[in-house]
C-alpha cells in the first residue's frame, strides 16, 4: 500500500500529464530522499535537507550532472506542487560536474555497417534514428497518423521539453514504413476481434473521442509484441515497443560492426546532425530538425567537423614522406 504522500505525488504528476517514465523517476527520487533522512516527512524538512541530499549524490555517489538535476527537479516538484512550499537557498549544494566530452559520431561507412547488422523492425527503427535525427523515445512513440507520406516527413509529438516538431523522412524508407503500417493494421484488427484494440491516448482524449483509441491513425508504428496491463488505468492494451529491445539490438550490431568506441542508439542522432552540416545544411535548419531550443546546443556538432581540433594540421604530415623514404 503506497503512503499518502506518494499517492499525492502520483496524482499531481498525472494531473499535469507527465509521462509514466517521469512519474517513476520522480517517485524513486522522493523515496530515496526520504530514506536518506530516515523517513522523516518532507513537510518537517526544507532547503537544508534537500541541499544535503544533493551534495551527497555529487560527492559520495559521484552521480552525473543530469542525474543530480533530475533528483532536484523531483524534489522541487514535491515541495512546490504537493506540499505547496517554495524551496529557497539551494545554491549552496555541491553540484555534479557536467561532462564536456564531444559526442561520438559514426562515419557514413560505420552507419552502413551497423545498419547491415540489424534486421526487421530494429533495422527500420535504427534507420529512422539516423535518417530523421530522432531520439529513441521519439521513435518508439511514433503514431501512424504522424507519418506523412505526401510531404516526406514525420511529426514528432510531445518530444523532449513537451515540444512538437516536423522532421525529414528519407525517401528510401517510404516503402518499408508502408509495409510496417500494413502489419500494424492487421495486428490491430486481430486485437479488436479478441476484444481489445484500444491504444493509450494523451491528455484524456479518449474521453472526448471515445472511438479514437481504436482508430488506426492513433496506433503506434512500432507496437509491443504482446498486450499488457496499463499501470495507471488497469486496462489491457498494446503499448509501443519496449525501447530496451532496440537498445540491445543496436548494442550488439555495434559490436558486430567492429566499432570499439562508446556508442548507442543516440549516436545515430549525433551522426544525423553532423552529416547534415557536413553536406552543407544551414545550422538553423539542423537546429529545427533536432528540436533544440538553444542554437549553442546544435553548435557542438560544428566542432566535430573541424580537423584535429580547430583545424590544426600536424607538423608530422610534412616529415612523414621523408621518413618513409629512409626506412
Image (cartoon, rainbow, N blue to C red):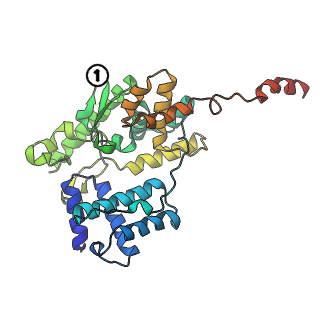
| Nearer the observer, 105 or 170 | 105
Q: From where the camera sits, is residue 248 visible?
A: yes
Residue 22: x and y in percent read 31, 55
User: Few, some or many C-alpha atoms within 10 Å of disc 1 (few <14, some 14-19, many ≥20)?
Assistant: few
* Residue that carries the numbered disc 1 in the rendered image: 151
Q: Residue at x 52, y 65 (%)?
A: 59
Q: Quadrant of the C terminus?
A: top right
| Nearer the observer, 128 or 156 | 156
Q: Residue at x 25, y 35 (%)?
A: 144
Q: Residue at x 54, y 29 (%)?
A: 108
Position above or below: 289 against 27:
above
Residue 270: x and y in percent read 48, 36
Label 1: state its secondary structure.
Answer: loop
Residue 160 relative to residue 96: left or right? left
Position above or below: 6 against 155:
below
Residue 75: x and y in percent read 33, 63
Q: Residue furthest right?
A: 326
Residue 207: x and y in percent read 9, 48
| Nearer the observer, 229 or 97 | 97
Residue 134 relative to residue 11: left or right? right
Q: Residue at x 21, y 72 (%)?
A: 4
Q: Quadrant of the N terminus?
A: bottom left
| Nearer the observer, 138 or 4 | 4
Position above or below: 215 against 75:
above
Amino acid at each position: 500500500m503506497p503512503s499518502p504522500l506518494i499517492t499525492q505525488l502520483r496524482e499531481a504528476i498525472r494531473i499535469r500529464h507527465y509521462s509514466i517514465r517521469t512519474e517513476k523517476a520522480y517517485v524513486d527520487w522522493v523515496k530515496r530522499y526520504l530514506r536518506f533522512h530516515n523517513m522523516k516527512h518532507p513537510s518537517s524538512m526544507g532547503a537544508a535537507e534537500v541541499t544535503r541530499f544533493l551534495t551527497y549524490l555529487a560527492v559520495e555517489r559521484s552521480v552525473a550532472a543530469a542525474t543530480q538535476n533530475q533528483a532536484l527537479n523531483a524534489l522541487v516538484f514535491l515541495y512546490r506542487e504537493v506540499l505547496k512550499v517554495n524551496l529557497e537557498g539551494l545554491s549552496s549544494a555541491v553540484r555534479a560536474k557536467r561532462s564536456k566530452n564531444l559526442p561520438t559520431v559514426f562515419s557514413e561507412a560505420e552507419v552502413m555497417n551497423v545498419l547491415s547488422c540489424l534486421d526487421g523492425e530494429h533495422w527500420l527503427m535504427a534507420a529512422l534514428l539516423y535518417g530523421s535525427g530522432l531520439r529513441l523515445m521519439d521513435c518508439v512513440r511514433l503514431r501512424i497518423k504522424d507519418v506523412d507520406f505526401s510531404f516526406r516527413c514525420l511529426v514528432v509529438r510531445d518530444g523532449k521539453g513537451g515540444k512538437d516538431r516536423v522532421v525529414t523522412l528519407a525517401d528510401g524508407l517510404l516503402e518499408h514504413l508502408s509495409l510496417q503500417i500494413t502489419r500494424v493494421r492487421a495486428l490491430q484488427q486481430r486485437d479488436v476481434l479478441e476484444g481489445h484494440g484500444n491504444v493509450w491516448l494523451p491528455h484524456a482524449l479518449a474521453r472526448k473521442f471515445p472511438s479514437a483509441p481504436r482508430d488506426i491513425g492513433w496506433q503506434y508504428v512500432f507496437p509491443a509484441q504482446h498486450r499488457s496491463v496499463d499501470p495507471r488505468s488497469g486496462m489491457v492494451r498494446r503499448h509501443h515497443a519496449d525501447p530496451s529491445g532496440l537498445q540491445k539490438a543496436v548494442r550488439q550490431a555495434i559490436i558486430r560492426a567492429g566499432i570499439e568506441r562508446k556508442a548507442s542508439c543516440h549516436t545515430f542522432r549525433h551522426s544525423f546532425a553532423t552529416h547534415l552540416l557536413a553536406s552543407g545544411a544551414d545550422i538553423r535548419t539542423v537546429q529545427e530538425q533536432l528540436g533544440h531550443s538553444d542554437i549553442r546546443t546544435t553548435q557542438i556538432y560544428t566542432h566535430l567537423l573541424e580537423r584535429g581540433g580547430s583545424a590544426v594540421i600536424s607538423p608530422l604530415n610534412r616529415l612523414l614522406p621523408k621518413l618513409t623514404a629512409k626506412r
